[in-house]
Amino acid sequence: MKPKITIHAGTEKTGSTSIQTSLHSSYRELMRHGILFPSSLGAPCHIHLTACALTDNPVHPIRRLLDITDETAFQSFSLDTKHALAREIEEQAPKRIIISDEHINVHLCSIDLLQEYKRICEEYGDIESVVIYLRRQDEFRISLFSEAVKMGNLKGFDIDNPLKLPVELPYRFNYLSILNNFSEVFGRDVLDVRVFDRERLPGGDVLTDFIQANKLPISPKKLGKNKKNRSIDRRVIRNFAKISSYITDNNIEDGPKLRERLINILAAKYNGPGPLMSREHHTQFMARFQHQNNEIKRYFMEPMDGDLFSEPKFYNPPYPDCSLSWEELFIDQFSESDSFLKNLEKAAFTLMRGNDGNKEQQKEDKTSTNNRVDATCLICGKRYMLWLKEKTREKCICPGCSSSGRANALMYCLSMITMGRPLPVSQHPTNNNMRIVGLSDSKVYSKVLSTKYNYSNMFFHKKPYLDIRTPPEEMIGTVDILISTEVFEHVIGDSMEAFRGAFKLLKPGGHTIFSVPYINKGDSVEHYREDLVDYRSFRDENGTWCVELIHENGAREIDRTPRFHGGPGKTLEIRLFNLDRVIRELHQTGFRDVTILEDKPEYGIYWGPPSRVLSARKPVSLDEENQSSHVSFY
């Protein structure tokens, strides 16, 4: 007999991560009662199964997040996900399966997508219920705003009126359409629609409500509570929103850590309520939803009298705006030696002191010929104007191929090795005898390299696989050039294993072109214990990305302030190098001729000393290995 399936489809900002994390941590207890919360579909939310329904949607945000935009990668991912779920069901033989992912309701936003999702689920069991929580729309909007402020991504928000929505209602706010689609695909009789309202939930807790409603044999008290999300006091949130956006827009170094530090300071100094709307704004906003909220009542299992949601709370008198200046708020929080001070001055003081008053001076600076240079892209050969007030390391600077300064720096080193001079790769002669391997290289330059050289782009997490710590025997001593950019800071364990693996891959006389984020002064930092063996990223109940750390002895812990590269939830920063450590570990591995690439604005390479690109060479002979090592500059 097939197991029964309960699908928990969110919606967003209704405590989904709290539910998922608790079910995930209760895996064994649930299985003792024949209930499976699959670990094979992603943790804690089952986003992998949602992704499988996104056929013919290569640019969908979820497929981009999981790096499966390529059709071959998507097909492989889908098969792997389904086989893993089938194996888990076969091994555990459950009577009931619970699948939970808040992305279902908004990202599977059509009948066709939901039908495909249903078809996949029915391969494994019979769908018994679909649980959907709804949150009052103004609370939902304000929650999204608070998250955007913390992340520095405020596109689509008006800071002075965060309730403002476009004329056409976004799908995630159209609860009636969401329910209509679910009803048509799954049937109205299986829908369990519930209100996310702390005034009405048992104990004010959605986890307790979910456990009771689904008759689960676990206790929310024993599970404990996740760390409460820090709200930003409404008196300072608008100013912090400006600071947070400034950090993002200007690619401020250590931006995520700086933003986290500022949030901690604000939470300590101002612990009043989070952002609230005026009664007038609330009335205008909720008027847009009056009709659909009345229509939604028919989807509840029991008749509902009165309003769908409780009335909002208004603080009377309203909290005043923060009267302190940003200088007064922060100046006593930092010592002169604090490494965050300079970033703070850039992000907070400079902005809030009114750069707008210097617009004429800025205009004069930008038109000055002393502040610009004619540059050539070393990938596609496009010529363009580079403004010298802009740091280029991660900024897309080439109007032709959208390459960054870092990409140009990598190709500068490669061109010097292969051609003896800086020449756009698009103009290199074909040389299939030169074997080049990249570690998760950007498509910006990997495509053109594949047309010029015997080039392979290899990955830790997908095919073609390569774990740089343990390269396969057949590849050892076969590579002329290894490109490793922004990889070694993510390697779990001893970073020297990665350097040794890179050394093994290269032929005698071969080169590595190498970059990691590093600081020029100060100590390098290992963020985690030496016995870390794996990790999983997930969003908590407030939508904040966290990491579950897995140690060698099986112990697990949660890091709620991790630093990711490539976007949250993707690649965790394990360490921050300093320059001395990078050079020392290259030399200790055996590399010689370590060369640091300085600024070359005429090729778009312009960002100053930190995190420059390096190259190093594997010695040809034992005599050369025994020679003293040195560092030079391009």
Image: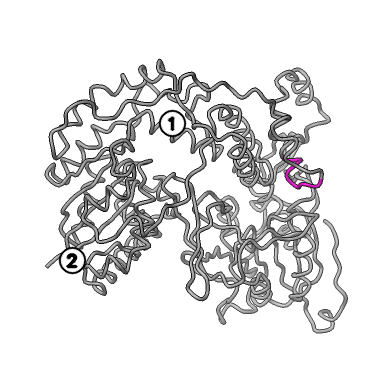
Residue situated in front as seen by the camera: 224 or 594: 224
Instruction: Give the residue displayed 55% in from the left and 71% down from the top.
Output: 467
Q: Circle 2 sits on which residue?
A: 95
In the rendering, at what x and y percent does residue 151 appear? 54, 40
Q: Is 475 located above or below residue 190 in the figure?
A: below
Q: Circle 1 sits on which residue?
A: 142
In the rendering, at what x and y percent does residue 486 appear? 63, 58
SS label for mark 1: helix
Q: Is residue 159 visible?
A: yes
SS label for mark 2: loop
Instruction: Give the residue displayed 45% in from the left and 50% down from the top.
Output: 65
Considering the image in quadrants, where does the C terminus appear?
Answer: bottom right
Over which residues does the magenta segment extend? 337-343
In the rendering, at what x and y percent does residue 614 appear? 75, 60
Sequence-earlier tag: 2 or 1:
2
Q: Give the crowd class for mark 1: few <14, some 14-19, many >=20 residues within 10 Å.
A: some
